[in-house]
Amino acid sequence: MKLQPYLYFDGNCREAFAFYQELFGGEIATLMTYGERPEMQMPPEWNEKILHATLKIGDEELLGADAPGNFKAPAGFEVAIAVDDAPLAKRLFEALADGGSARLPFQEVFWGKGFGMVTDKFGVPWLINCS
């Protein structure tokens, strides 16, 4: 069994996944557009929007898509990132906070070297933990 976060975007999935690939590394394995699926009738402005994206980071996968017409801001979850290196954790936190908002600044905590909560510029909530 493998748990795979699936993120929905309001038309900017391509931009988000390019940002995540640059930040986390890995490889974009899938970037399929709505226009590439002939049996799906979408308005022409959605032809270049993302039907499905996969970012492979080591053994993990982050999945996503644009949600035409029914996008809802994320609620009730956060994507957690666990790293062992405090400078790396802080760098990830700061990059995600750039253009977004730090909900809990990255700081040393009683259980580890650092922890922070941030919502990135795409509206995705993250937890960064360095134990």
Image (tube, rainbow, N blue to C red):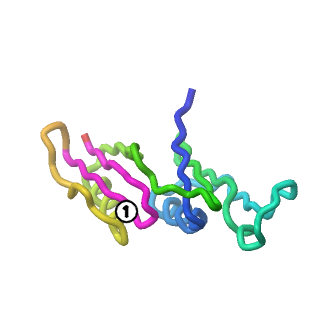
Query: What residue is at 55 percent from the left and 60 percent from the top?
Result: 9
Location of the N terminus by quadrant is top right
The residue range painted magenta reads 113-130
Question: Is residue 57 found inside the magenta-colored segment of the image?
Answer: no
Q: Position of residue 120 (x, y in %)?
A: 39, 62
Query: What residue is at 60 percent from the left and 66 percent from the top?
Result: 11
- Look at the numbered disc 1 and give the secondary structure of its residue: helix
Q: Position of residue 66 (x, y in %)?
A: 62, 59
Q: Which sits in the foreground, 58 or 68?
A: 68
Q: Residue furthest right?
A: 38
Q: What residue does disc 1 label? A: 96
Query: What residue is at 55 percent from the left and 31 percent from the top?
Result: 2
Q: Residue furthest front?
A: 69
Picture quadrant where residue 67 is located: bottom right
Q: Position of residue 87 (x, y in %)?
A: 26, 56
Disc 1 residue crowd, few under 14, some 14–19, many 20+, Cα 10 Å: many
Vertically, is 91 above or below 84? Answer: below
- Magenta part, dominant SS: strand
Amino acid type at mark 1:
Leu
Q: Left or right: 6 with respect to 93?
A: right
Q: Left or right: 78 with respect to 90?
A: right
Question: Is residue 122 found inside the magenta-colored segment of the image?
Answer: yes
Vertically, is 107 above or below 58? Answer: below
Q: Position of residue 78 (x, y in %)?
A: 39, 46
